[in-house]
Each structure stands twice: as C-alpha cells, then as structure tokens.
Image: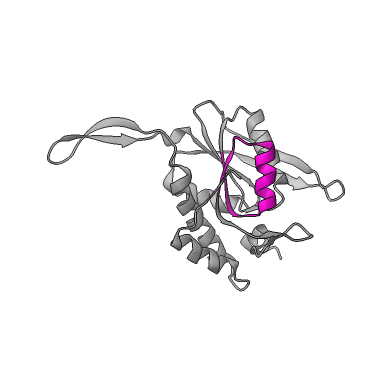
C-alpha cells in the first residue's frame, strides 16, 4: 500500500486526545489543525528547493527556498476545512480550492455538488485534505475532479485511514501518495473507521 504513517510522538499524543469521546469541538479543531501542520512537515519533504544567495550580518552565504505559490490545498467539504489552516500556517501563499461531495443514500455513489479550483499546472503541488479516509469513495472522487482540472502532483493528507480506504485509493490512483497520522484496524458495517474517532465533521462543527 502506498501510504506513509507519520507517527511522531507529538502526533500520537494529540491524536489520542482527539479520539476521546468527551473532547469538545474547540479542542478538537485546535488538535486537527496542529496534527495537520505536523503531517505537512513530512508531506512537503519532496518539494524542490532553489538555491539563493543571502547576506548574514557577517558574510554572504547560500540559502534555500521553495515557491509556496506552487502549492495548492484542496479540502473536501466539509470536514477537510478543519485541516486547511494547519497547512496555510506553514505555507501562507498557497492557493486554496474546494471540492464538495456527498454520498447518494440509495446508490452509495459519490455526487459532486461543488468544485472551485485555482489554475493547476505541471508545477503545482496539490494536497487533497480529508480527515477520515474510510471507504475511500469521496477521496477518489475528489482526486478525479482535481485531475480533470489538470492536477498531476497530488498527495492525499488524512488524519485517520482504514486499510480498505487506502486500498481503494491505491486501486484507482496508484500515483497518489497518502500521508496519514494513523492506519486504523478496519471499517464497521456502517463504513466508520474502527477504533476511529466518530464523524470528524460532526465533531468539528457540533452538528450532533
């Protein structure tokens, strides 16, 4: 499976607090932002650096930078919104697109209801954000949409993933690398990740 589990001690600590059923929405939002920021350190490791010359108070020396204007983040509505600020804190010049998807209750197929993306090019580094990679249906649909708009260099960033979801994404998009804080045990009969943390969107926005 093409998945990178970023299991830094800080992430494991913060994720444990998020999993607790009595963790409230304020703390849940803050922790999601913090964990996304920590995952982003690893997920951006591949971005090309450019050499430049700078002057310190003592002498000239070589330095390095990368163009964060080439970074595009695409949260899947609605829960993916909770991850956006974590990456934007590191890469404030990144562009932001949005993809809205829901699952038809009868066919169980993903339905696109909104898509607004910036201009994508071969140099764009695209990060699709979705806290819970459960069945993988929504993530695959979102990646389909990004590719239809010209996206090529795509990374899927999640908080928690299921083996089934990782397999599904790898099956349809083998070129997409997944970064996640945890690869959990399995899905239950209703498509929830076990042990998981419940519905991330409901916990973020207190809709249940």
Vertical arrangement, residue 206 with respect to residue 162, above or below: below
Q: In which quarter of the image is residue 65?
A: top left
- The answer to whether residue 124 of the structure is visible from this angle is yes
176 vs 51, nearest the viewer: 176
Residue 59: percent from left, percent from top: 13, 36
**Image quadrant in which the C terminus is located:** bottom right
Q: Quadrant of the N terminus?
A: top right
Above or below — where is 190 with respect to 109? below
* Front residue of 178 and 198: 178
Q: In the shown orientation, is residue 131 left or right of residue 168?
A: left
Q: Which residue is drawn at 45% across and 58% down?
A: 8
User: Where residue 198 sits in the image (x, y, percent)?
Assistant: 67, 63
Relative to 17, 108 lies left or right: right
Q: In this view, does 53 lie above or below 34?
A: above
Percent across and percent down for residue 136 are: 69, 47
- Can you see residue 26? no
Q: Is 117 inside the magenta-drawn segment?
A: no
Residue reaching furthest right?
Answer: 106
Whole-percent x, y for residue 167 in the image: 67, 46
- In the current view of this chain or complex, which residue is farthest to the left? 58
The answer to whether residue 160 is magenta is yes
Which region is colored magenta?
155-179
Report the front residue among 117 and 34: 34
User: In percent of the image, x 70 and y 39: which residue is there?
Assistant: 141
Which residue is more in the foreground, 200 or 43?
43
Farthest residue, direction bottom: 22
């Amino acid at each position: 499976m093409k998945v990178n589990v970023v299991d830094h001690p800080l992430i494991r600590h913060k994720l444990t607090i998020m999993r607790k059923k009595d963790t409230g929405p304020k703390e849940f939002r803050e922790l999601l932002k913090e964990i996304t920021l920590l995952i982003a350190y690893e997920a951006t490791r591949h971005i090309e650096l450019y050499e430049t010359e700078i002057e310190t108070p003592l002498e000239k020396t070589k330095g390095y930078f990368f163009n964060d204007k080439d970074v595009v983040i695409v949260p899947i509505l609605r829960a993916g919104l909770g991850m956006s600020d974590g990456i934007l804190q590191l890469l404030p010049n990144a562009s932001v697109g949005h993809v809205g998807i829901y699952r038809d209750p009868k066919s169980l197929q993903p339905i696109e209801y909104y898509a607004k993306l910036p201009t994508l090019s071969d140099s764009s580094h695209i990060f699709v954000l979705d806290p819970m990679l459960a069945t993988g249906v929504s993530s695959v649909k979102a990646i389909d949409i990004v590719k239809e708009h010209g996206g090529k260099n795509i990374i899927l960033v999640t908080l928690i993933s299921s083996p089934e979801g990782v397999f599904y994404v790898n099956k349809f998009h083998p070129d997409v690398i997944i970064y996640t804080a945890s690869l959990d045990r399995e899905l239950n009969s209703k498509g929830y990740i076990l042990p998981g943390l419940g519905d991330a969107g409901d916990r973020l926005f207190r809709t249940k």
